[in-house]
Image (spheres, helix red, strand yellow):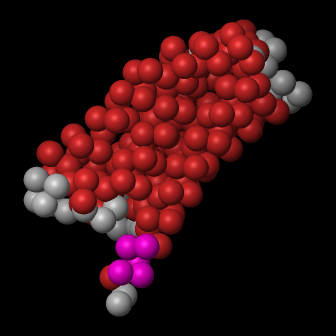
Amino acid sequence: VSLRRCPGYWPLTLAIMLSALGLGMVISHFMPLLAWTGVDARFALVAAALVGVAQVAGRLLVAIIGTGWNRPMLVAICLMGLAGALLALVLAAQWSVLIFAFALMQGACYGISSALRPMLIRDVLGQDGFGASQGAVLAPAFIAFGLAPLLAASLVSWAGYGALIMLCTCLQIISAAVLMDESRGRDVLLNQ
């Protein structure tokens, strides 16, 4: 059976691809986005460093609390957290301390979601042929992530950083909604 015919393949692939596109756009314009808020350069540098620290902390949290949670819902919550981080970034223009909330949420939510991604793919598509399943799901995400800097630069030159933040926020929210819908659909199938 082709992976593309497996229930859950398309929603999972779409959610991961759209999230990767949004994340790639933010990462490729990270320092210009921080500068756009008008936050002091020293705060911006500390915030950039905190992203990596929070990412590791998020992955450690997954290791400590385990992976027995409802993975699609937990990943969806993290994607909503990435959208919330962008809201904190916008508000940092008024309250510069929120730049740290942005950095911590961005790092932790990505750290947790990326740690759970292989297990999520296995949950949806099964253990058999896992390498092929993961490759099929992640290939569009890697392509989207690779195109993200060019797309972000084009959007910024045309409409500015506000439009970039709005698009990236929408991409994370749509990704979360697709994952939650796929999770509910699988729960219904399992309970029949």
Can residue 84 be seen in the rendering of this structure?
yes
Number of disc labels: 0
Q: Residue at x 49, y 32 (%)?
A: 21
Q: Nearer the viewer, residue 38 or 135?
A: 135
Q: Most extreme residue toward the bottom, as rendered?
A: 192
Quarter of the rendering containing residue 86: top right
> Split into 4 quadrants, where in the image is the C terminus?
bottom left
Say if the magenta span includes residue 146: no
Q: Nearer the viewer, residue 107 or 143?
A: 143
x then y, percent, for residue 101: 69, 36
x then y, percent, for residue 135: 21, 40
Quarter of the rendering containing residue 8: bottom left
Up/down of 37 relative to 72, above or below: above
Can residue 49 be seen in the rendering of this structure?
no
Left/right of residue 184 with respect to residue 177 in the rendered view: left
Prevailing SS of the magenta stretch: helix
Up/down of 142 relative to 41, above or below: below
> Split into 4 quadrants, where in the image is the N terminus?
bottom left
